[in-house]
Amino acid sequence: MAELAVQKLIYLAPFSGSSGVGDYSDDFALAITPHVGELVEVRYPAARSASVRDVWRYRRELRQLLAESDPSSTVIHSELSGGSIVPFWATFGLKGVARTVTIHDAPRPVWFPFLTKGVANKSMMTRAIHGPLNALCFRMERRSLRRSGVVVLTRAGAQSVRAARIGATVLEGGLLIPHRPDVPAIDERPRAVGLFGHVYKGKGFSLLTEIREALDDDVAIRVAGRGTESLAPIAGVEVLGEVVGAGEDEFFASIRLLLLPYRRRPVMRLLPFHASATHARAVAYRTPSMALRSQTMDELAAEGTCLIVDGGPAELAHAAGVYLSSDDAAEKAVHGIDHFRERMTDESLIEPFLELWRRPR
């Protein structure tokens, strides 16, 4: 039987299927269940979709749960990402109970603490509120987490959180690798590359035209994920939209290489460090990835799970063509993935959280 790290864990996370963080939360809840006496999940709407009324409702719900709990054996754990106002405000000012968080968009926990549904629907209002109040928001984020244990899912992100003086203790973690069924080996798949994930700025979907123009004509490009159905049609690019279950299996079975043409831009003059859930999904399907250089991608390259390209979309497309034409490149890349999967088990990846929860309260 697994050692219990805490008797009762109240877990604040986005609804399943609402976002990449929501998907991660499903895997996380499954992995930690054997290590807690009781897991109470409080699922909330994804960023940009919660109202002020929602925030207050969740705040009341959390306080009711705490009234029914023993504070000496209870921990509140929250998933924090850009615009995750529900867990931020639901726990703001809480005293007398241990709190831990996962920061997904380091270095800041939430970035936009006033991003309610009404504000998010008006981009000019978002800037008008958070721009002038940026320094105040940063201080509020520091204050909210000053006694909290923090886990960050990249090395660069953890360093940036420490530098920003956020949290009482900051530990480095990593994304859980989802459990997925076996798909055909790389050399049995079509000669194709893919882009996958939730569409938002910086993920590289805007570079598809340039990638298509620079890539050999005999290499197919397949795109799938939340929001991809809204992308403008591009000749030679197959867009599948959101895929789940068997559809996701079929997508990864139809590509030999996943492209990660991320171009992260500063937000409020700070460069965010995101862990790539898309890359973790590729690892689950033993699919090699190729990315444009950045600090977080360099970390994955050091782990042997990602090929790095200097330059832009044209250079990425050229490198992908060379990779697909190589006899041993895929075999070497898959070997790196398998070695990584052997080391990065669920148990090893949840250990930073268990370490925080075992500490005296």
Image: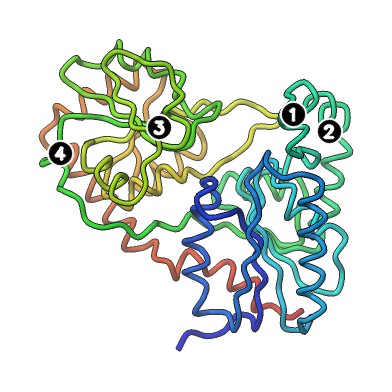
For the N terminus, the quadrant is: bottom left
Badge 3 amino acid: Leu
Q: Which residue is mark 4?
A: 189
Vertical comparison of 128 with 70: above or below: above
Residue 113 percent location from the top left of the image: 79, 42
Badge 1 amino acid: Met
Between the C-alphas of marks 1 and 4, the distance is 42 Å
Q: State the image quarter where residue 266 is shown.
A: top right
The numbered dot on residue 268 is: 1
The extreme top residue here reads: 213
Whether the residues at callouts 2 and 1 have beta carbons within 8 Å, the answer is yes
**Earlier-in-chain disc, 2 versus 3:** 2
Residue 114 percent location from the top left of the image: 81, 39
Q: Which residue is mark 3?
A: 260
Callout 4 environment at 10 Å: few (<14), some (14 to 19), or many (20+)? some
Element at label 4: loop
**Earlier-in-chain disc, 1 versus 4:** 4
Q: State the image quarter where residue 19 is shown.
A: top right
Badge 4 amino acid: Arg
Between the C-alphas of marks 1 and 3, the distance is 24 Å
The numbered dot on residue 281 is: none
Q: Which residue is mark 2?
A: 134
The extreme bottom residue here reads: 1
